[in-house]
């Protein structure tokens, strides 16, 4: 497999402009002759479908939710970065670019990242024009805050619901195109396969989640904006429906999957309370600005009430180990330290599977320093949410937090045009791997989704169509189409008719999640990964033998939907472990215990400065590794240190 | 955070499809811990049903953190259940007592046909937004974001209205199954902002016409919607919608066509 | 081709019509009550007041026409909304708990028809088929001395009180008057007006029954 990034050459600040000038165009009158399929209706998919529809293409947009407004982008709380420099603190496109490359631990493509930083300012203009109610100052101008340890205030936000408001902006733009007839929307419709004809992506096979009807949709090209694969861990902050099926089906047809082991763990989530737990809830990272993280110094104290543990017996491990940054160390450092102290038996909270996985986040000092009223103003909503979920009031007793999977940097390999290794198949947003390297900065996910959707895909889609001109018509009864439909139907039948049905899909998903979380989570080692690689195929075989689905495939059947997704997570989970095993270094969200120095990650630029693009070979255990070397012309790799 | 175990009796609305008449079925939920969320309690019941070869209870849910608006059911006669400002997914079992009987029903409204059990079709809300719930701005043609200052108070009000998650609890709770709070929230969000002025007259007329065409009832000012709303969207936006509609009906030069479902 | 949208077609338009016609009717009811206070000034005042009104046919017939129109609009909009709102629910909830609805709001569709019947009875009793034409004071006092008739009036006015309490409050909302700073006044106004009319109106049969007002 040849990996051509198709980056333009020349000074980095001119690359995108130059690239656009060289783009092939499709004349306005011809655009309606092209059908573009967009799968997913989140920030990337919704924005792309709306923009492409507006340009005059014939767009078909698909989502598994009952409405495009519910894509999981909606749950992003913090904000969106943009290099506007409204605060006059020296921000610039270059600085945002620099921070993102560095934050990604030098595992991303410079050209892509620069373009992202460059487009960030246009996103804010676009969102404001759509009526997104960003926070404002008393003078009526847009407000900003500093986020995730950035040294400038470049984050725009709409209360604690920035993702919601930006998504509703894109959803409204999409709704306008649905009304105009340029976009046809298919909600409660799940993509289950890609149709490849003549080496190009020419459509998808879907299952209507209301009736079970499996149908082909033919198009000139397909854009996947289907989000990340964090639910491979079973417990994550993702929505329950988030899944990897679309990207995994594409991968099985030849789209390379890049850097699957780069997953981001968010340090401040509400810990698991029991074995039945279905998801983890994120609490904004801003809590670490005023809260102090600690665990009991002595194992005997872990079951005591925190109020009864004297100050001398409290271990403020972040403050002690990282005097400079204290409780504000980056996400991965905070997460790993929580893992370490709980591994040492100092975790607090309820016991789940024989372990106490929780640390205290204490606001007692902040309340006595600033007063309860001030804390209420800053974090009132979060404290209320915490109390709803746990039954404890953080005003009276310390919060319990623990890291949880939050975002996946890996995804389908794409070139500068966001095209995968299958011609005519594009990927945007969290579904691709392109911009965040090994670690994503806070408030950058929304930025990337919208940059891809509003500003990159509309150009590169046109470029592709301008290049291919006219594709031969493809009929529903063509062997390539009928074959894909038949394969999907057979898979449904296979899931419905396991030889020895015993357990619901969740039973297997929980077990898979447990393996991935313990062996390929915050901290990984060779032994554990090898063990996971032995356990996953066994569990997968058991799944196909024993998965139990009641009802039929020809109706609304949520168990069947979940089973199909779990089946794909098995294969992706295996690839994740393989990638983690192969990457013998620690970088960003990927921490290998063999590669550290005093607890700090040791990157190996000499051997691993590449994108690992895995190719499907037909056997999930033996994918082929392709490497896209990464070169850094502008931001020279340095070592991260927070001591 | 003391933990207790609850044994509950669920009376669940079961309906095979849109054309089935539906009935209540009784299920036991035993050894439910008070730490569970309401939907986790249903997960446990469902997993047991599947393992016993029975059909699980179909219910909608996704983010399970109260923002996507997918979940929702009427629990003991109250949309989203007994806790104020809380979606079904964030409701926890500590709100219930051992031995409780819990009645679970879908949102009931002609505008929201039942698809299965507790799952309803809310695409009517999408069509209301499609009718005009947007500001027409071509991608890439926006002017500099800080060119137009917007008073903080106005921006905050717009955000208050924009908090709506489109869950449909307002319709479910309204004695008339009216979609006024949902429609009003979007009309108000956009009409408050300077960007929304150009389409102001058409927007309110088209959205109200669509809301009516979808078969929702009219507002009779009971205030049930505001009480049920998990995001606390205010009735004041309905008053504002009324003003907007009358104003545009009186002022606009050109009539608009009525709308169909 | 679809027909153009008109205000009265919309559910909001219908409520606006109900609010505006309701304001007219409440206005009349208030005036009616104030005029009836003449009862306490004795037969001459009461009958004189009635005679004076009758001597101004344009006023009487103008008012009657406006009221007829207001009632027609109020009732037809209410009927149309009632039918629509019933259809909008579809199937009924097995369990249903009101969180915000007060007694007055809940009973609007009952108090409305009861009031209509009461108004018809009231018109027959005093205006169309009076026992002693021209002797208003006597008609009222004789009528209210009959406990059965008095209790019809008491019941009718209680229904009126609840109906206009929710009606006035609701009209503010329908006509777009909702501002957090002034909202408490909406409720106060609704209570004040409906209480004044109801207590005032109730005082007439009660004073006759208790013998405060006699022939």
Image: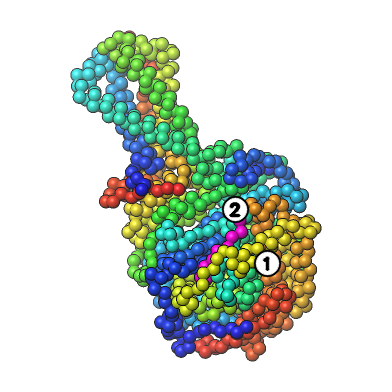
Residue A70 visible in the shown view? no
Magenta run includes residue A219: yes
Q: Pick the quarter of the image with the C terminus of chain A.
A: bottom right
Task: Name the residue at 63% across, 80% down.
Answer: A613
**Mark 2 crowdedness (10 Å alpha carbons): few <14, some 14-19, many ≥20:** some
Q: Nearer the viewer, mark 1 or mark 2?
A: 2
What residue range appears in magenta? A213-221
Q: On screen, C17 above or below A274?
A: above
SS type, badge 2: loop
Residue A365 % position (x, y): 59, 65
Q: On screen, C114 above or below A417?
A: above
Scheme by which the image is coloured: rainbow
Residue A154 % position (x, y): 46, 73
> Mark 1–mark 2 contact, CB under 8 Å?
no
Residue C176 visible in the shown view? yes
Residue C94 % position (x, y): 60, 37
- Residue for badge 1: A568
Residue B101: mark in rendering: none
Residue A357 % position (x, y): 71, 65
- Residue for badge 2: A210
Q: Is residue C215 left or right of residue A545?
A: left
**Mark 1 crowdedness (10 Å alpha carbons): few <14, some 14-19, many ≥20:** some
Which corner quadrant of the image does residue A439 belong to?
bottom right
């Amino acid at each position: 497999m040849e990996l051509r990034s198709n980056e333009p050459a020349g000074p980095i600040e001119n690359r995108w402009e130059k690239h656009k000038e060289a783009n092939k165009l499709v004349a306005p009158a011809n655009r309606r002759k092209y059908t573009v399929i967009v799968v997913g209706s989140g920030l990337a998919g919704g924005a792309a479908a709306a923009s492409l529809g507006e340009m005059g293409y014939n767009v078909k947009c698909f989502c598994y939710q009952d409405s495009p407004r519910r894509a999981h982008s909606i749950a992003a709380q913090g904000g969106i970065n943009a290099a506007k420099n409204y605060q006059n603190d020296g921000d610039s496109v270059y600085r945002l670019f620099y921070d993102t490359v560095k934050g990604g631990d030098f595992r991303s493509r410079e050209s892509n990242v620069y373009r992202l930083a460059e487009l960030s300012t246009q996103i804010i203009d676009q969102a404001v024009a759509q009526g997104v109610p960003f926070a404002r100052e008393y003078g009526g101008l847009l407000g900003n805050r500093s986020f995730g340890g950035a040294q400038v205030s470049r984050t725009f936000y709409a209360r604690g619901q920035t993702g919601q408001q930006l998504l509703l902006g894109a959803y409204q733009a999409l709704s306008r195109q649905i009304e105009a007839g340029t976009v046809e929307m298919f909600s409660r419709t799940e993509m289950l396969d890609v149709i490849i004809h003549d080496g190009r992506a020419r459509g998808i096979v879907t299952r209507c989640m209301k009736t079970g009807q499996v149908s082909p949709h033919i198009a000139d090209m397909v854009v996947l904006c289907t989000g990340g694969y964090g639910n491979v861990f079973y417990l994550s902050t993702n929505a329950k429906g988030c899944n990897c099926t679309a990207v995994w089906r594409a991968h099985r047809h030849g789209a390379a999957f890049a850097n699957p082991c780069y997953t981001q763990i968010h340090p401040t989530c509400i810990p698991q309370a029991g074995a039945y737990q279905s998801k983890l809830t994120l609490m904004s990272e801003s809590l670490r600005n005023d809260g102090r993280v600690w665990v009991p110094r002595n194992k005997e104290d872990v079951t005591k009430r925190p109020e009864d543990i004297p100050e001398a017996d409290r271990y403020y491990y972040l403050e002690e180990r990282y005097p400079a940054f204290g409780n504000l160390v980056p996400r991965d450092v905070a997460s790993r330290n929580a893992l370490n102290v709980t591994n040492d038996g100092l975790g607090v909270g309820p016991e789940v599977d024989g372990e106490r996985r929780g640390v205290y986040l204490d606001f007692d000092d902040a309340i006595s320093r600033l007063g309860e009223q001030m804390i209420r103003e800053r974090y009132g909503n979060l404290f209320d949410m915490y109390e709803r979920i746990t039954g404890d009031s953080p005003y009276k007793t310390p919060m319990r937090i623990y890291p949880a999977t939050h975002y996946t940097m890996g995804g389908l390999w794409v070139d500068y045009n966001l095209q995968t290794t299958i011609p005519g198949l594009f990927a945007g947003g969290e579904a691709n791997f392109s911009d965040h390297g090994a670690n994503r900065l806070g408030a950058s996910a929304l930025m990337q989704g919208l940059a891809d959707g509003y500003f990159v895909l509309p150009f590169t889609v046109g470029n592709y169509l301008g290049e291919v001109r006219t594709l031969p018509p493809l009929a529903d009864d063509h062997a390539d189409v009928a074959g894909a439909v038949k394969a999907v139907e057979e898979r449904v039948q296979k899931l419905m008719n396991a030889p020895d049905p015993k357990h619901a899909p969740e039973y297997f998903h929980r077990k898979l999640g447990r393996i991935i979380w313990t062996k390929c989570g915050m901290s990984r080692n060779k032994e554990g990964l090898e063990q996971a690689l032995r356990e996953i195929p066994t569990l997968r075989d058991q799944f196909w033998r024993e998965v139990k689905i009641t009802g039929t495939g020809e109706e609304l059947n949520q168990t069947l939907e979940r089973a199909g997704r779990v089946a794909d997570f098995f294969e992706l989970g295996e690839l994740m472990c393989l990638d983690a095993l192969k990457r013998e270094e620690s970088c960003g969200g990927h921490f290998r215990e063999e590669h550290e120095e005093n607890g700090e990650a040791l990157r190996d630029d000499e051997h691993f400065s590449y994108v690992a693009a895995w190719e499907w070979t037909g056997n999930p255990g033996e994918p082929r590794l392709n490497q896209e070397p990464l070169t850094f012309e502008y931001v020279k790799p340095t070592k991260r240190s927070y001591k | 955070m003391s933990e207790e175990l609850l044994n509950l009796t669920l009376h669940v609305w079961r309906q095979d499809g849109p054309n089935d008449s539906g009935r209540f079925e009784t299920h036991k939920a035993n050894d439910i811990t008070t730490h569970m969320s309401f939907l986790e309690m249903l997960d446990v019941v469902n997993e047991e049903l599947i393992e016993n070869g029975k059909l699980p209870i179909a219910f909608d849910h996704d983010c399970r953190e109260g923002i996507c608006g997918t979940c929702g059911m009427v629990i003991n006669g109250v949309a989203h259940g007994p806790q104020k400002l809380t979606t079904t997914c964030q409701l926890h079992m500590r709100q219930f007592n051992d031995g409780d009987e819990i009645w679970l029903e879908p949102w009931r409204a002609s505008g929201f046909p039942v698809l299965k059990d507790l799952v309803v079709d809310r695409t009517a809300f999408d069509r209301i937004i499609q009718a005009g719930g947007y500001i027409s701005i071509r991608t890439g043609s926006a002017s500099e974001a800080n060119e137009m200052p917007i008073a903080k108070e106005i921006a905050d009000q717009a955000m208050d209205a924009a908090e709506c998650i489109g869950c449909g609890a307002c319709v479910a709770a309204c004695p008339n199954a009216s979609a006024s709070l949902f429609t009003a929230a979007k009309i108000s969000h956009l009409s408050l902002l300077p960007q929304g002025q150009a389409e102001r007259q058409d927007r309110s007329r088209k959205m109200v016409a669509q809301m009516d065409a979808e078969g929702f009832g009219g507002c009779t000012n009971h205030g049930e919607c505001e009480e049920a709303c998990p995001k606390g969207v205010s009735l004041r936006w309905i008053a504002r919608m009324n003003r907007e509609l009358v104003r545009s009906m009186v002022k606009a030069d050109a009539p608009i066509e009525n709308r169909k479902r | 081709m679809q027909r153009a949208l008109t205000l009265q077609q919309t559910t909001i338009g219908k409520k606006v019509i109900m609010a505006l016609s309701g304001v007219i009717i409440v206005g009349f009811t208030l005036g009616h009550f104030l005029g009836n206070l003449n009862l306490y000034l004795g037969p001459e005042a009461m009958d004189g007041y009635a005679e004076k009104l009758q001597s101004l046919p344009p006023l009487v017939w103008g008012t009657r026409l406006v009221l007829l129109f207001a009632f027609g609009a109020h009732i037809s909009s209410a009927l149309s909304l009632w039918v629509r709102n019933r259809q909008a629910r579809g199937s009924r909830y097995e369990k249903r708990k009101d969180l915000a609805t007060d007694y007055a709001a809940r009973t609007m569709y009952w108090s409305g028809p009861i009031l209509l019947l009461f108004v018809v009875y009231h018109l027959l009793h005093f205006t169309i088929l009076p026992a002693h034409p021209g002797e208003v004071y006597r008609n009222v006092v004789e009528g209210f001395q009959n406990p059965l008739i008095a209790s019809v009036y008491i019941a009718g006015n209680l229904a009126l009180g609840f109906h206009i309490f929710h009606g006035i409050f609701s009209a503010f909302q329908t006509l777009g008057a909702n501002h957090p700073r002034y909202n408490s006044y909406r409720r106060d106004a609704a209570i004040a007006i409906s209480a004044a009319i109801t207590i005032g109106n109730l005082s007439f049969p009660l004073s006759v029954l208790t013998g405060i007002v006699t022939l």
